[in-house]
Amino acid sequence: MKKIVPFGILVIVVILALIYPGNVAAAKPATTYNGADIAWMLISTALVLLMTPGLAFFYGGMVRKKNVISTMLQSFVCMGLITIIWVVFGFSLAFGDDIGGGFLGSPKTFFMMQNTLGVAWLGGTIPVILFAMFQLKFAVITPALITGAFAERIRFNSYLIFITLFIVIIYIPLAHATWHPDGYFFKLGVLDFAGGTVVHMSAGWAALASAIYLKKRNEVEEAHTPARISYVILGTGLLWFGWFGFNAGSALASGELAATALATTTTASAAAAMSWIFFDMLRGKKPSALGACIGAVVGLVAITPAAGFVTVSSSLVIGIVAAVISNLMVILRSKTGVDDTLDVFPCHGVGGMVGMLMTGIFATKSVNSLGAEGLAYGDFGLFGKHLIALVAVSAFAFIGAFVLLKVTDLISPLRVTPEEELAGLDVSQHDEEL
């Protein structure tokens, strides 16, 4: 029966594709299309996709050798599963006509990618289909980020169920609320340029819930020796490279705003990487490749919501502050009983929250006229809105993820058996070895 269910799902998708062929006729190009903007967004979409394999290397290099393939596959498989969900109904729920009080779009608007050709997104300069594919890559990497928290102890089949529920019930409502013109947080005035709230906070809080729910690994007391530091360095490079599409691409055009977002992105990451190393040295530790890589990623996370709203000099501050706070949170987490395997919450969750608050402090209309003036420019309004959103999103993502974990566990047990964990997930879940 368990083997029939996945096949049945694929059959349903095929039937839907035949019933709803979508835009099969040649569409008349929208008069507002801009070739340069389309070219930049095609490149950005490809860059963001590259981040998921980059994350696979980043996480895969940090786990033990017997779990490398399993950990990498948990990221890689999102490119398949989430794409199908997004194309069938996910994009429409996230960006279709609002029907859920600012938290949900209509499944009819873009069902099976209908109504996505010959129309510019929000009257802009790129087609809806391109915007849909760009946003797909954000949806792909978000559940993949969570995997570092429960690495080395989750059943693969159960993982697929959980991330499906997570995308539909947590990610999509947050994306709609934050980025849709009729979204609740959007109308409130919350600024999230590229996903600090939608991507990193949701993944970070879901990661914390997962680590608590699944409890410690049976071998957690053993020395955890990363399998391949070289994988971590490679993954960091791919993430940094892809993040230019993630942040600069969120300008949705090839103009000055995209260039500014690119500059703030690389500056914050550089500042965070060096700050992590220096902070470790102040604590008496040797500077490490692992520390530099984690710091760089923390900087990328923190600048994500702010990238198109702050100055380059402000991005330096954001990178430094995020690195120090996340480093301290890693230390604090190590003193608790929470087994967040790869410190997803201290790095992505806390990094996302720091970035959100820093956006409320350093945002300025001199960078983006569609933004607002932050606390540093004498206006408390934006910072207050971000505080409200931070609390609301944190509660929703954490409690929601905890409930989804319980539901998944009832459908299919989440934890591997002690024997499977001892053997390693590569062999026990996939019958493969590094």
Image (cartoon, rainbow, N blue to C red):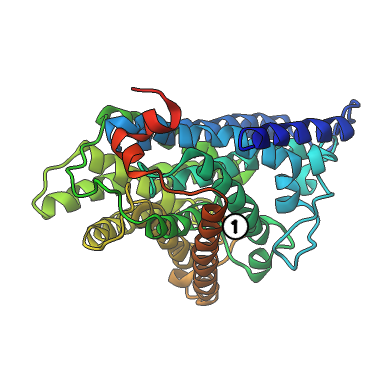
Q: Above or below — where is 184 with respect to 19?
A: below
| Quarter where residue 265 is shown | top left
Q: Nearer the viewer, residue 350 or 237?
A: 350
| 224 with respect to 75 (left or right) | left
Quadrant assignment for the N terminus = top right
Q: Above or below — where is 421 with respect to 213?
A: above
Kind of element beneath mark 1:
helix
Q: Nearer the viewer, residue 72 or 183?
A: 72
Q: Above or below — where is 15 with respect to 375?
A: above
Quadrant assignment for the C terminus = top left
| Quarter where residue 100 is shown | bottom right
Percent position of residue 120, x then y: 80, 41
Q: Residue at x 87, y 35 (%)?
A: 20
Q: Amino acid at mark 1?
A: Ile
Q: Which residue is mark 1?
A: 170
Q: Above or below — where is 10 with respect to 280?
A: above
Percent position of residue 149, x then y: 38, 49
| 232 with respect to 96 (left or right) | left
The answer to whether one can see residue 207 in this image is yes
